[in-house]
């Protein structure tokens, strides 16, 4: 039979009590510090990706979207210092405004837009035009995850009892440790005092 010293029993009891508390301490300390962003060095003029002034184009980002979502429009006419117009059945008629050498806008796709491909047409003040396509898709309802244990059934059954049961088992272990530390220990084979 192995005898347990009083000191070892107290260490076990302290570990049973303090272990869960120490595991929670980092969560209570707050979020980790975030590094400050380093400002980017200015790009040389030769490597910037600005289109030449004579290029006429229109881009829609994202090119596939659900009804009710915003899209970003980036366009260029010969003279990007004046607003232009972008027309589509998906969001109607919007004016693109000069910004950083391009023409930009952020319209919302109409809620009642049916799924399909829609033409997006740029109309420049000088009469030039450009176009691209926007694909509108059905709304996708998020699926419920598979019921693979407590993650899928957290609101049912024992899901709400896991923390209280763990706490009760920890306290029971601490009580057993304290009771064992207070009991007198008899070592067999030793001479009586």
Image (spheres, rainbow, N blue to C red):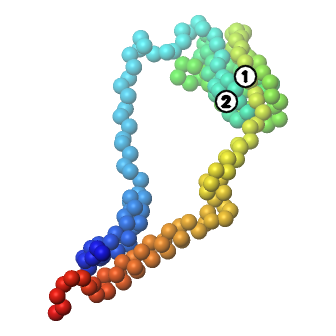
- Verify CB contact (< 8 Å) between mark 1 and mark 2: yes
The residue shown at (36%, 78%) is 177
Percent x, y of residue 144: 70, 47
Of the 4 image quadrants, the one containing the N terminus is bottom left
The residue shown at (40%, 80%) is 175
Q: Which mark is residue 71?
A: 2
Q: Residues within 10 Å of mark 1 (few under 14, many from 20)?
A: many
Residue occupying the far top of the picture: 54
Of the 4 image quadrants, the one containing the C terminus is bottom left
Asked whether residue 54 appears in the rendered view, the answer is yes
The residue shown at (54%, 71%) is 164
Residue occupying the far front of the picture: 189
Is 24 drawn above or below residue 48 in the view shown?
Answer: below
Out of 140 and 39, give the one closest to the viewer: 140
Percent x, y of residue 126: 69, 10
Out of 149 and 28, give the one closest to the viewer: 149
Q: Disc 1 and disc 2: Cα gap in Å? A: 9 Å
Q: How many marks?
A: 2
Q: Quadrant of residue 113?
A: top right
Percent x, y of residue 38: 35, 34
Q: Earlier in the sequence, mark 1 or mark 2?
A: 2
The residue shown at (70%, 35%) is 69
Q: Quadrant of residue 96?
A: top right
Asked whether, in this view, residue 26 is left or right of residue 56, the answer is left
Is 98 drawn above or below residue 149 in the view shown?
Answer: above
Mark 1 lies on residue? 134
Is 85 drawn above or below residue 33 in the view shown?
Answer: above
**Mark 1: secondary structure:** strand
Asked whether residue 83 appears in the rendered view, the answer is no
Q: Residues within 10 Å of mark 2 (few under 14, many from 20)?
A: many
Out of 101 and 40, give the one closest to the viewer: 40
């Amino acid at each position: 039979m192995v005898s347990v010293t009083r000191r070892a029993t107290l260490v076990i009891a302290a570990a049973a009590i303090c272990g869960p508390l120490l595991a929670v301490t980092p969560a209570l300390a707050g979020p980790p510090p975030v590094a400050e962003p380093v400002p980017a060095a200015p790009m040389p003029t030769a490597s910037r990706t600005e289109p030449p002034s004579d290029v006429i184009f229109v881009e829609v980002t994202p090119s596939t979207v659900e009804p009710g979502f915003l899209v970003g429009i980036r366009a260029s006419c010969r003279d990007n210092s004046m607003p232009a117009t972008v027309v589509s059945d998906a969001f109607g008629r919007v004016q693109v405004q000069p910004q950083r050498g391009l023409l930009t806008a952020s319209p919302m796709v109409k809620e009642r837009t049916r799924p399909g491909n829609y033409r997006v047409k740029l109309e420049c003040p000088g009469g030039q035009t450009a176009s691209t396509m926007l694909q509108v898709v059905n709304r996708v309802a998020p699926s419920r995850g598979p019921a693979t244990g407590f993650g899928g059934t957290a609101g049912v059954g024992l899901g709400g009892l896991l923390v209280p049961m763990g706490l009760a088992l920890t306290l029971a272990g601490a009580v057993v440790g304290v009771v064992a530390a207070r009991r007198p220990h008899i070592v067999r084979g030793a001479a009586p005092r």
